[in-house]
Image (tube, grey):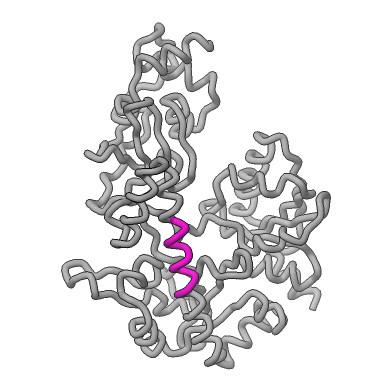
């Protein structure tokens, strides 16, 4: 099996692998990520050493790793399938044929990871690419973008929190979500009370390109780079994601005309606009900072959603939140939890069962132990309401 793996790496190029799997390879060597769905290509193919690196998830490897990521198979199975598909060994009855290969990914927009950068970010990229390598250069650009975003998010928070909450929003947080004023303050929750006032404030203090890069403003096609609007028009209850005591991401909860009841067809939550740099991704742990003060062996609860994590914190538990299985952090990020006794408390519905199975798979693959606790309510927030 080891010899066959070496033959695969020597005879099959990474470009051939990507094209065989239905990917459109851009002229700069970028393709869509094999790890998840995306609209802009963030995975770079390197023909010089026959490898790839996906900048959206910080993962990469050989042609075999590419196949494993795309089809979610283990190493031995990947070698067998690749060898059969590319004619290195005689095929069996269950060989992957063209009809079994995932549908050809949607061709990415003209925008790519370089076009997402502003002038300063491109200069930083070129400087570090010249003295280090491309991976380190992209890392430096991401860090620069993150620092810029944090400045904007801090300004937005301070501006909005100074104007307080409407009475309806207070009632929703205190009565329906069962949060305490202290928790609301600690998690830096705020409300956009006057959409146009907030939008104009941001435009006066930051360039449109920076606001768009931060994911706060959209881009109007055909109306120039300086056109765009604040995305949180109806999703005005803002839930910040905090890392090292600074806001690094924002997610809006539907709250319009004094109500959190989203109309049919409308999403309850809205995250920041992301681009090929993938700085504004939702796939991160909510309340990650709780782990900074925890000791090895302490209990850490994983719950579904931000509000459940806040409720658990209110009741004295160490808790982090994942906003659904589709927004789970990459499997590699779970190494952050390895020193704790981790207990999953999923919602008591089909989505919760899927999330529990997803987490169990990640923990099993890494030799980590996960405990799953079922609760006599739909979710933690509902359970808190019963107890209050």
In percent of width and height, residue 118 lies at 30, 62
Of residues 94 and 245, which is closer to you in this image? 245
Q: Is residue 127 left or right of residue 300?
A: left
Q: Quadrant of residue 316?
A: bottom right
Of residues 190 and 296, which is closer to you in this image? 296
Q: Quadrant of residue 64?
A: top left
Q: Main secondary structure of the magenta part?
A: helix
Name the residue rendered at 55%, 46% in the picture: 330
Question: In the current view of this chain or complex, which residue is farthest to the top?
Answer: 90
Q: Quadrant of residue 217?
A: bottom left
51, above or below 361, in the image: above
Residues in magenta, as a range: 142-152
In percent of width and height, residue 386 lies at 77, 74
Instruction: Locate the C terminus by quadrant.
Output: bottom right
Q: Is residue 96 left or right of residue 297?
A: left
Name the residue rendered at 58%, 70% in the picture: 246
36, above or below 257, in the image: above
Of residues 245 and 216, which is closer to you in this image? 245
Name the residue rendered at 56%, 51% in the picture: 328
44, above or below 48, in the image: below
Q: How many marks?
A: 0
* Magenta segment includes 146: yes
* Magenta segment includes 71: no
Q: Is residue 177 left or right of residue 96?
A: right
Question: In the current view of this chain or complex, which residue is farthest to the front?
Answer: 131
Name the residue rendered at 71%, 34% in the picture: 367
In percent of width and height, residue 266 lies at 42, 70
In percent of width and height, residue 56 lies at 44, 48
């Amino acid at each position: 099996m080891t010899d066959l793996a070496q033959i695969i790496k020597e005879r099959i190029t990474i470009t051939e692998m990507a094209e065989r799997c239905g990917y459109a390879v851009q002229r700069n060597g970028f393709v869509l990520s094999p790890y998840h769905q995306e609209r802009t290509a963030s995975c770079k193919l390197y023909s010089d050493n026959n490898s790839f690196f996906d900048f959206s998830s910080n993962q990469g490897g050989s042609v075999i790793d590419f196949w494993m990521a795309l089809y979610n198979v283990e190493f031995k199975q990947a070698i067998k399938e690749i060898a059969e598909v590319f004619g290195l060994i005689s095929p069996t009855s269950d060989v992957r044929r063209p009809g079994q290969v995932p549908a050809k990914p949607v061709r990415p927009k003209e925008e790519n990871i370089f076009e997402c950068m502003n002038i300063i970010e491109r200069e930083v990229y070129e400087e570090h690419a010249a003295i280090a390598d491309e991976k380190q250069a992209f890392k430096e650009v991401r860090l620069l973008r993150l620092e810029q975003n944090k400045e904007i998010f801090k300004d937005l928070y301070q501006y909005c929190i100074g104007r307080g909450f409407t009475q309806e929003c207070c009632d929703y947080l205190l009565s329906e979500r069962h949060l305490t004023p202290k928790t609301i303050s600690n998690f830096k929750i705020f409300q956009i009370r006057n959409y146009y006032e907030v939008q104009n404030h941001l435009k006066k203090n930051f360039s449109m390109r920076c606001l768009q890069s931060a994911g706060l403003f959209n881009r109007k096609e055909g109306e120039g780079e300086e056109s765009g609007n604040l995305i949180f028009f109806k999703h005005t209850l803002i839930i910040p994601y905090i890392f090292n005591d600074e806001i690094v991401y924002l997610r809006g909860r539907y709250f319009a005309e004094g109500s959190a009841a989203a109309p049919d067809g409308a999403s309850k939550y809205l995250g920041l606009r992301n681009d090929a740099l993938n700085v504004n991704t939702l796939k991160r742990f909510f309340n990650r900072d709780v782990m900074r003060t925890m000791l090895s062996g302490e209990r850490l609860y994983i719950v579904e959603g931000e509000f459940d994590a806040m409720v658990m914190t209110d009741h004295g538990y160490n808790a982090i939140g994942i906003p659904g299985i589709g927004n789970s952090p990459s499997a590699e990020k779970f190494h952050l939890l390895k020193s704790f006794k981790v207990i999953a408390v999923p919602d008591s519905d089909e989505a919760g069962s899927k999330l529990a199975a997803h987490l169990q798979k990640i923990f099993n693959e890494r030799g980590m132990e996960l405990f799953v606790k079922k609760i006599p309510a739909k979710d933690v927030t509902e359970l808190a309401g019963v107890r209050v």
